Amino acid sequence: MADVTSWREAGSAAPAPGASGASGASGASDAGARALARDVRAGLQSTPRTLPCKYFYDDHGSRLFERITRQPEYYQTRTEQALLEEHAGEVIERVAPRELVELGSGVGRKVRLLLDAMRARGLLRRCLLLDINALYLRRSVAQLAAEYPGAEVRGLHGDFQADLQRLGPGGGRLVLLLAGTLGNIVPRRLPEFLSQVRALLVPGDGFLVGVDLVKDRARLEAAYNDRAGVTAEFNRNILAVLNRELRADFDLGAWEHVAFYDEDEAWIEMRLRSAADQRVTLPALGLACDFRRGDEIRTEISAKYTRASLEARLAGSGLRLSRWWTDAGQRFALALLQPDVAPHDGSDLPPGAAGFPSGSNG
Ligand code: TRP
């Protein structure tokens, strides 16, 4: 059986009857459209200007990302797939999950390796996919429901950072975050995100993360500047999303794709650079933005980790590194995180007891 729930619509006030909203091909809810408007306004008015990367993934953007994963320079997908083929059985044996939850599932191909390992051991009961793109989510849920008839397959349409707590309590749960998506969270925010995931788990549960590793600049930069130009098209597509959803008038031809590795931050930064002096209007926001030639908008960061730098971010999250697998070339890793064994009954530590550095947010 299969169904898809929109968290936004299920969780808050029902959309006004007859509200047309700005739901485009991605089927964004009204609340989703309001969030987009709020995020874009804040991002374009901040210094430096930014746009949240989750808005890349409308239907066209999701398709473009699929093409990125097949580019010869983009080693991540192939490497992660091989690691999963090799180690899925061991992950499942260690966690013995009856429920698999994939955050940011996309087309959801790799999840099968884990579902197969669960089914082979008679464990598989439930599979939950969470994605920002409703069309891809519906498709993946329907496909998995057909392929795993014994399992309850559900989709949750939402943003895995904002909507995580809606997953409810764990127990027999394995959460997945693949495709280097962890890197798209600003590293200083990672401990907070990890504690949120920790709250969805009980001791013995697991959080399996695909982690792109620090490596030489040339290889990293090539992965985000593919020769076929697919990443450039993907990057500019966020402007097409704003044109459609916010009636903006970005001229996609007047923006250059920029992606470079910032060694101090250990992240790839993706930007769009204005090729001319130009004014862009966003009537839905009552906003006009002036750009000089060379001005940039930051659209994405993709942080790279080492085992040590990841473990440093785990401090205070309530999760510990339980297993770490890498390929021979040390390009990519699978990290299995599990709850710290609590001193007494496994319940959560009281706030403040988890060792967060104080004053980390204003
Ligand atoms: N999670 C992927 C990554 O960080 C997403 C990604 C790949 C991406 N290429 C991109 C995001 C280009 C924006 C632009 O590698």
Image (cartoon, rainbow, N blue to C red):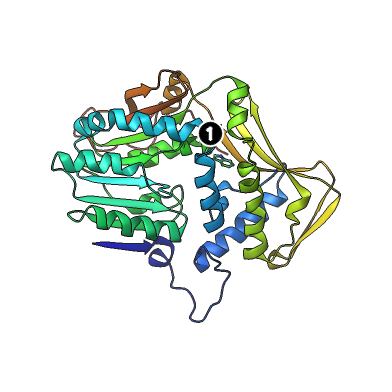
Q: Name the residue type under label 1.
A: Tyr
Q: Quadrant of the C terminus?
A: top right
**Quarter of the image holding residue 298?**
top right
Would you say residue 218 is visible in this rendering?
A: yes
The x and y percentages for residue 227 are: 64, 36
Residue at image point 30% right, 57% down: 154
The x and y percentages for residue 47 are: 72, 43
**In the image: residue 189, left or right of residue 239:** left
**Quarter of the image holding residue 179?**
top left
Mark 1 nearby-residue class (10 Å; few <14, some 14–19, many ≥20): many
> Does 257 appear above or below 266?
below
Residue at image point 82% right, 56% down: 279
Query: Between residues 160 and 255, which one lies in front from this camera angle?
Result: 255
Residue, disc 1: 74
Would you say residue 353 is visible in this rendering?
A: no
The x and y percentages for residue 293 are: 84, 44
Q: Secondary structure at mark 1?
A: loop
| Residue farthest toward the bottom in the current orientation of the protein | 18
Q: Quadrant of the N terminus?
A: bottom left
**In the image: residue 345, left or right of residue 273:** left
